[in-house]
Image (cartoon, rainbow, N blue to C red):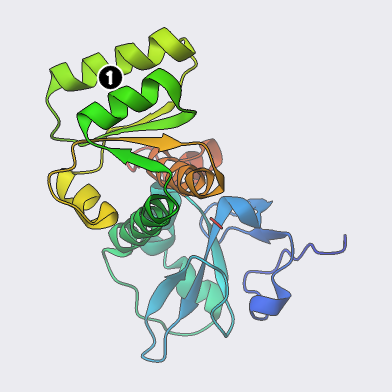
Amino acid sequence: MLAGVDHGEADAGPRRIGTERLCVATRTVRPVAEMIRFVVSPDGSVMPDLKARLPGRGVWVTASRAAVAAAVSRKAFGRGFKRDVRVSPDLVGLTEGLLERRALDALAMAHKAGRVAAGFAKVEAALASEPVVGLIHAADARPDGIRKLNAAARRRFGEAGPAVIDTLTSAQLDLALGRSNVVHAALLAGPASAGFLARWDGVKRFRSGAPDADAGAGRGEMGLP
């Protein structure tokens, strides 16, 4: 076996994770960066360990809605832990919510680092002269505002312009940025912005699924630092 590779169903703790793990849902081996670790809480409930740091044995599932749903329906957690465990029927939603929460925490950190311009006028000004790497439009934003800012981004950066995020609500943006009525925001280049975009990519991958996860979970289910 290669160093750092362990294909057992459960790891031996956060210090013994390795570089690849077996997904208990799809039965495929993947890099741990493409997976989510789950542990058993003191009350016997299965819970996500997104940072892969919680004590005790952990089992791994491909980081997609479909794979986590398959793990729940196939009772793969009990098999992986080799014990009776309690699995919430909404474990998929719980996991997705935690991933989204981590992304919003990263957005708050980017804001504190001065890498977020919020408000239509500030976003428009940033698109004219700043190193914008992402555009955020609230899910309930007016179409004309989205259209104008996206057009401004294309004029300056071309079609391969900043990443566009349009599924967060205004209430979520208000909470992350510590102000009210946030509808549009721009991410400026920097480590904190890169951290948020990486975490948001993780949310998107979880929702859209991976090919192996979809195949392993059946045709009826769809859906980091």
Reply above or below: 154 against 202: above
Along the viewing direction, whichever of 40 and 126 lies nearer the viewer: 126
Along the viewing direction, whichever of 65 and 147 lies nearer the viewer: 147
Q: Quadrant of the N terminus?
A: bottom right
Q: Quadrant of the C terminus?
A: bottom right
Q: Residue at horizontal 54%, vertical 51%?
A: 26
The number of callouts visible is 1
Image quarter of residue 209:
top left
Reply above or below: 129 against 209: above
Residue 167, horizontal then vertical, whole percent: 26, 38
Q: Secondary structure at mark 1?
A: helix
Q: Residue flagged by tag 1: what amino acid is it? A: Leu
Residue furthest toward the bottom? Answer: 42
Q: Which residue is mark 1?
A: 149
Residue 64, horizontal then vertical, whole percent: 44, 48
Decide if residue 179 is on the left or right side of residue 130.
left
Q: Residue at horizontal 49%, vertical 85%?
A: 83
Along the viewing direction, whichever of 13 and 74 lies nearer the viewer: 13
Q: Residue at horizontal 64%, vertical 77%?
A: 14
Residue 222, horizontal then vertical, whole percent: 34, 40
Estimate how packed mark 1 is, as few (under 14), some (14 to 19) or many (20 or more) residues with alpha carbons within 10 Å.
Answer: many
Reply above or below: 219 against 54: above
Decide if residue 77 is on the left or right side of residue 220.
right
Reply above or below: 106 against 122: below
Residue 114, horizontal then vertical, whole percent: 42, 48
Q: Residue at horizontal 29%, vertical 71%?
A: 88
Decide if residue 171 is on the left or right side of residue 209.
left
Along the viewing direction, whichever of 179 and 83 lies nearer the viewer: 179
